[in-house]
Image (cartoon, rainbow, N blue to C red):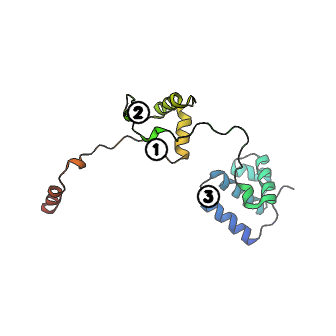
Amino acid sequence: MHRVHTLSDEEVKALEQLHRETNDADVRSRCDMILLSNDGLSPPQIAKRVRFSRYTVVRFVQRYEIEGLQGLYTKPRSGRPRRATLEYEVEKEPRSLGLPFSNWTTANLAEYMAKQTAIVITPRQVERYLKMNDWRLRRPVRTVKHKQDPDLVAEKKTDG
């Protein structure tokens, strides 16, 4: 049958810890698959609970049996590596690059990267790259703090 061997207490603890600590939703779902298999559920029952196909459940149970916890991680895919990265001049303000706008948008960034690198990517792809690298496009916050006299501000706070 396509069920995981009876797990030791240490294996269960390691799976529960990985489930708790990982930021990867796929790895978390795969931990669930193995733990549910250990609880005696069949691949079709597990598939219903974790919302994957039974074939995916069987594949990861088998990978866990062969590779252990490492079998739950996504493996690198074959094929051409990605050509576009965010190692371009996106940290600079657009106006300093001679562009007619002050703030980056994903569409502006995609267009700029296409002109600079001859690699055409969609704004959605730019959004994914930004998210993968924990970058965020935001509007700048306008303040007048740099124009305030610190002594006067301190005086007003003590008077109030």
Tag 2 residue? 97
- Pick whichever of labels 2 and 3 is earlier in the sequence: 3
Tag 1 residue? 136
Residue 61 percent across, percent down from the top left: 79, 55
- Pick whichever of labels 2 and 1 is earlier in the sequence: 2
Judge whether 141 appears above or below 10 on screen: above
Q: Is residue 60 left or right of residue 112?
A: right
Residue 15 percent across, percent down from the top left: 69, 63
User: Marks 2 and 3: CB-CB under 8 Å?
Assistant: no
Outermost bottom residue: 9
> What amino acid is found at the position of numbered circle 2 in the picture?
Leu
Q: Is residue 150 left or right of residue 125?
A: left
Quadrant of residue 120 within the rendered picture? top right
Tag 3 residue? 22
> What amino acid is found at the position of numbered circle 3 in the picture?
Thr
What is the secondary structure assignment of the residue under circle 1? loop
Q: Is residue 116 left or right of residue 6?
A: left
Q: Residue at x 61, y 62 (%)?
A: 20
Q: Residue at x 19, y 50 (%)?
A: 148
> What amino acid is found at the position of numbered circle 1 in the picture?
Arg
Outermost right residue: 1
Residue 56 percent across, percent down from the top left: 76, 48
Gap in Å between the C-alphas at discs 2 and 1?
19 Å
Outermost left residue: 159
Disc 2 crowd rating (10 Å Cα; few below 14, some 14-19, many 20+) is: few
What is the secondary structure assignment of the residue under circle 2? helix
Nearer to us in this view, 23 or 70: 70
Gap in Å between the C-alphas at discs 1 and 3?
22 Å
